[in-house]
Amino acid sequence: MPGLVAIVGRPNVGKSTLFNKITGRRTAIVDNTPGVTRDRIYGKAEWLGREFMLVDTGGIEPDSKDVILSRIRAQAQLAIDSADIIIFVADVKAGVTANDADVAEMLQKSGKPVILCVNKCDNIGDTPTEVYEFYNLGLGEPFPVSSVHGHGTGDMLDEILKFLPDSGADENEYDDAHIKVAVVGKPNVGKSSLINKISGEERAIVSDIAGTTRDAVDTVINRGDEKYVFIDTAGIRRKSRVSENIERYSVIRAYMAIDRADVCVIMIDANEGFTEQDSKVAGYAHEKGKASVIAVNKWDLIEKDDKTMKKFENELKIGLSFMTYAPFVFISAATGQRFDKLFKLIHWTCEQNARRITTGRLNDLLSQATARVQPPTDRGKRLKLYYMTQASAKPPTFVIFCNREDLFHFSYQRYIENQIRETFSLDGTPIRLTLRERGES
């Protein structure tokens, strides 16, 4: 798993600007008003071929100097508890403040690698003499940086790489032969119980208190000839319900687990039924192109008749209309009910997600599909589909060359996608269609 690097510091020292500069995107909101970043923002960053996850620790809305200090300390403590590396940002124009010294003392005691970034050094090749004052914080060499212009960020990133955990350090027990399965869902839905039951041991802490799992935990499981890595993740809550700040780091770890998974098991509580938050969790896996299995847990606790399962399935199909390809399984993490079916679906969806189809077979399908249903026209101009090929897998991504993209309406794209699914049995995985315009022939 990529390392997690947290940016901490006082309000208005340029944390969000530095985040945007490193990630190369304007993801974080930047404003001169202290505390404008009201939620933790995270994004992937890369330097010299190494990837890591960067977190902008905002959310400080000071009402008084005492509140500023307490909240900065809280943010720093969260970074200490959750991050692999900490970037401590200070302001060269403000100099070393009492709050800086207080947080620096916490960071010193943590034992975590800390990169001291002295921001707002905007003159090229000219290190302000004020930078040397920051040696007094006891955090080692200060790196003069301009987050606005990018000066000095390269040296700082070089230093981060020295402490970045090896991407394979957490995975030395397994290789590409293992299917990586991220178990995701709301808090207290039974994710840890599922993994404990599968592994036959208490690998994850199980509690009725929502949010017990703070980090993504890997469990290697051999089942017959197949090898799996189950990743237990913290429950993903609606933002308005994330009252405990550390849970926001846990959500980041959960999304990171989805990013590196081959298959996502999206767990839904049968007692609560399908919720909007379930849709959001599934939506993230869908956007990332992951093979997915919808596992309805605690099915043993539901009073049932011969129509209960069908009714629940229909509710899921409505709520998850954007991922109708995902199969359902009704399980009990407590008893192991339908675990055999769960494993079959994990293996099957993983294979579907990695499928490759020859260009010849794809173009045979394209000819048949366009003959069966004529491409749309607009003002006498007809859409022409010339050629289709598969560009990549995980998920299966197909490139279609046409005369005009604007004529390739969404409904006809959906028709072509359905034809691909039906012809090649590509259920259980999202499909991506990419359009390319080509001149008339």
Image (cartoon, grey):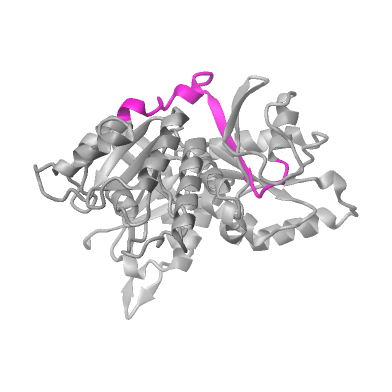
Per the image, is 179 magenta?
Answer: yes
Q: Within the magenta stretch, is there residue 381?
A: no
Residue at x 18%, y 51% (from the top left corner): 149
Counting the numbered discs, the total is: 0
* Quadrant of the rendered image containing residue 335: top right
In the rendered image, residue 268, in percent from the top left (x then y), is placed at: 70, 50
Indicate left or right for 53 with 293 as reference. left
Q: Which of 257 and 142 is in front in this view?
A: 142
Q: From what the image shows, is residue 372 above or below residue 179? A: below
Which residue is depicted at the point 20% across and 37% down?
132
Q: Give the range drawn in magenta.
A: 161-190
**Figure quadrant of residue 307:** bottom right
261 vs 277, nearest the viewer? 277
Q: Nearer the viewer, residue 292 or 140?
A: 140
Kindly tell me whether residue 45 is visible in this rendering: yes
Q: Where is residue 291 in the image (x, y as percent from the top left)?
A: 55, 43
Specify the farthest residue to the bottom: 379
x, y percentage for residue 426? 55, 45
